[in-house]
Image: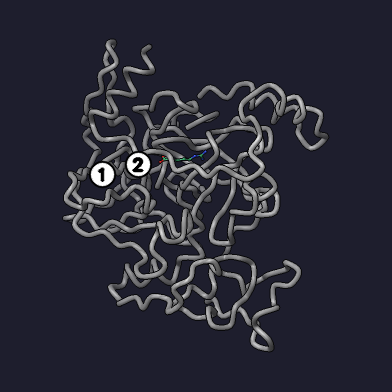
C-alpha cells in the first residue's frame, strides 16, 4: 500500500516517465521461477550472481551512495518526470531523449549536488528536501539529434539529449563533471550506475541517491535475449542472473567508469530494459562514445549537419555502409570500426575504414 502511495506521490510531483520497454520476439514468461531454475543450472551463473539475484530488493541490488555526494556528476532531471543526468561541464547535462517532454514549456528542475532530494511522509506523500550543497536550475535549451536521427524515428536508438541550464553551476566538491570517453567501452568493464529510481521493478523511488556496479556484456550476449534489437550505439550491462540494474526513474542517468568520488568517465546513459534486474534482461544504455562527435558539437556550439539518409535501419546494424561512414552519420554508429561480425564489410567495398577519431 505504501508503495502505491509513494508512486502516486511521484506522479504528483511530475508525471513519471512511462518506461519504454521493447518486447523481444523471444519473450519468455518473465519473472517466474522457471527461468530462474534454468539459470541456476547454467554453469556460467556463479553462486555469487545467484545470491545477488536473491538479494535483489534494493537503484536495484545496489546501495545508497557512501559517503553522501560521492557521485558528484549525478544530476536530478525533473522535466515532466523523474530522470537522472550526467554533468558534462558547468552548463551542460547529458540525459536520455525519452526524459524530454514533447511540450518543452513543461516546468523543469535540474539539481546538481544532491544526495537526498526528497522526503516521504508516513502517509506516503513526497516533498522536496533542500540540502545546502544543492544547486537548482531550469532548462534553457534542449539539444537532441535532429532530422532523420531523431529519437522516436529510430525507435529506442538515439536515446540521448543534452540540456543547457539557465545559469552555470558552481563547480565544487559536490558538483563535479564527468569526463567524456576517449574509446569504446570493452565488454566486461565494471561500471557504476546511479540514480533515485525505483529499488525494485514496480517499486518506489529512493529519495537518497543509490548506486550499483554492473559489468558490461557483449552485444551478442545481450541480443540473445533482446531479439537482435541491440545495436552498436548501445551498451548492455548487468548480471546474467539478474539482481543488479537501473530501473524506472534512473533513466538519463550516468553509467560511468568510476575511479574515485571526484573522477569518472561517462560511458552510457540509462535508457531501458525489459523490466528491471530480471535474469538475462540486461539494462540497456545509450553508448556515449558513439555520440561523441555530436556531443562535442553541442558543447562547442558548432552547427551539426544531420545525416542525409532518412532511413534509420542502417544505424548500428553491424554493416559498414560507405555512404554512412561520415561525421554527420556518426561514422555509421561505429559499424566501420573494430568490427568482427561476419559480413560487416559487404557494403563498403574497398573503403571499409574506421574514420572515427
Ligand atoms: N526507462 C526507464 C526510466 O525512464 C529506465 C529503465 C532502465 N531499466 C533497466 N532495466 N535498466 O527511468
Q: Secondary structure at mark 2?
A: strand
Residue in the foreground of this view, choosing between 15 and 246: 15
Residue wearing tag 2: 83
The residue at 26%/44% (across/down) is 79
The correct choice, above or below, for 1 with respect to 141 in the image is above
Marks 1 and 2 in Cβ contact (< 8 Å): yes
Task: Give residue 52's quadrant in the image.
Answer: top right
> Left of 231 or right of it: where is 91?
left
Residue wearing tag 1: 79
Residue 114 lies, in percent from the top left, at 30, 37
The residue at 53%/33% (across/down) is 276
> Left of 57 or right of it: where is 143?
left
Residue 236 lies, in percent from the top left, at 59, 49
The residue at 25%/18% (across/down) is 125
The residue at 43%/55% (across/down) is 159
Task: Decide: few, some or many residues near mark 1? Use Cα within 10 Å; few <14, some 14-19, many ≥20.
Answer: many
The correct choice, above or below, for 352 with respect to 119 in the image is below
Q: Separation of disc 1 and disc 2 at Cα? A: 8 Å
Residue in the foreground of this view, choosing between 78 and 90: 78
Q: Secondary structure at mark 1?
A: loop
- Quadrant (top left/top right/bottom left/bottom right) for the N terminus: top left
State the colouring used for the structure image. one colour
> Left of 82 or right of it: where is 321?
right
The correct choice, above or below, for 285 with respect to 3 in the image is below
Residue 233 lies, in percent from the top left, at 54, 61
Establish whether ligand 1 lies closer than 8 Å to the Cβ of label 1. no
Amino acid at each position: 500500500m505504501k508503495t502505491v502511495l509513494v508512486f502516486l506521490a511521484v506522479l504528483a510531483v511530475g508525471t513519471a516517465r512511462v518506461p519504454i520497454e521493447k518486447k523481444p520476439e523471444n519473450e519468455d514468461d518473465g519473472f517466474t521461477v522457471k527461468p530462474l531454475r534454468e539459470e541456476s543450472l547454467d554453469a556460467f551463473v556463479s553462486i555469487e550472481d545467484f545470491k545477488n539475484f536473491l538479494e535483489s530488493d534494493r537503484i536495484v541490488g545496489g546501495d545508497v551512495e557512501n559517503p553522501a555526494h560521492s557521485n558528484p556528476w549525478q544530476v536530478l532531471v525533473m522535466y515532466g518526470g523523474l530522470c537522472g543526468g550526467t554533468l558534462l561541464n558547468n552548463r551542460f547535462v547529458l540525459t536520455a531523449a525519452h526524459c524530454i517532454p514533447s511540450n518543452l514549456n513543461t516546468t523543469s528542475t535540474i539539481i546538481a549536488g544532491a544526495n537526498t532530494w526528497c522526503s516521504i511522509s508516513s502517509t506516503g506523500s513526497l516533498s522536496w528536501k533542500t540540502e545546502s550543497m544543492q544547486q537548482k536550475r531550469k532548462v534553457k535549451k534542449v539539444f537532441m539529434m535532429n532530422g532523420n536521427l531523431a529519437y522516436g524515428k529510430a525507435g529506442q536508438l538515439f536515446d540521448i539529449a543534452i540540456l543547457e541550464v539557465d545559469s552555470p553551476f558552481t563547480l565544487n566538491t559536490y558538483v563535479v563533471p564527468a569526463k567524456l570517453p576517449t574509446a569504446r567501452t570493452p565488454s566486461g568493464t565494471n561500471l557504476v550506475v546511479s540514480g533515485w529510481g525505483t529499488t525494485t521493478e514496480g517499486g518506489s523511488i529512493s529519495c537518497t541517491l543509490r548506486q550499483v556496479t554492473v559489468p558490461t556484456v557483449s552485444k551478442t550476449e545481450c541480443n540473445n535475449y533482446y531479439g537482435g534489437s541491440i545495436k552498436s550505439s548501445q551498451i548492455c550491462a548487468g548480471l546474467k542472473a539478474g539482481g543488479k540494474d537501473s530501473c524506472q526513474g534512473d533513466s538519463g542517468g550516468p553509467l560511468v567508469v568510476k575511479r574515485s568520488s571526484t573522477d569518472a568517465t561517462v560511458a552510457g546513459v540509462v535508457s531501458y530494459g525489459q523490466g528491471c534486474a530480471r535474469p538475462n534482461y540486461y539494462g540497456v544504455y545509450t553508448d556515449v562514445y558513439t555520440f561523441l562527435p555530436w556531443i562535442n558539437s553541442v558543447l562547442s556550439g558548432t552547427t551539426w549537419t544531420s545525416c542525409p539518409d532518412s532511413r534509420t535501419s542502417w544505424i548500428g546494424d553491424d554493416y559498414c555502409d560507405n555512404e554512412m561512414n561520415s561525421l554527420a552519420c556518426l561514422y555509421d554508429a561505429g559499424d566501420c570500426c573494430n568490427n568482427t561480425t561476419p559480413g560487416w564489410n559487404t557494403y563498403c567495398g574497398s573503403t571499409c575504414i574506421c574514420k572515427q577519431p
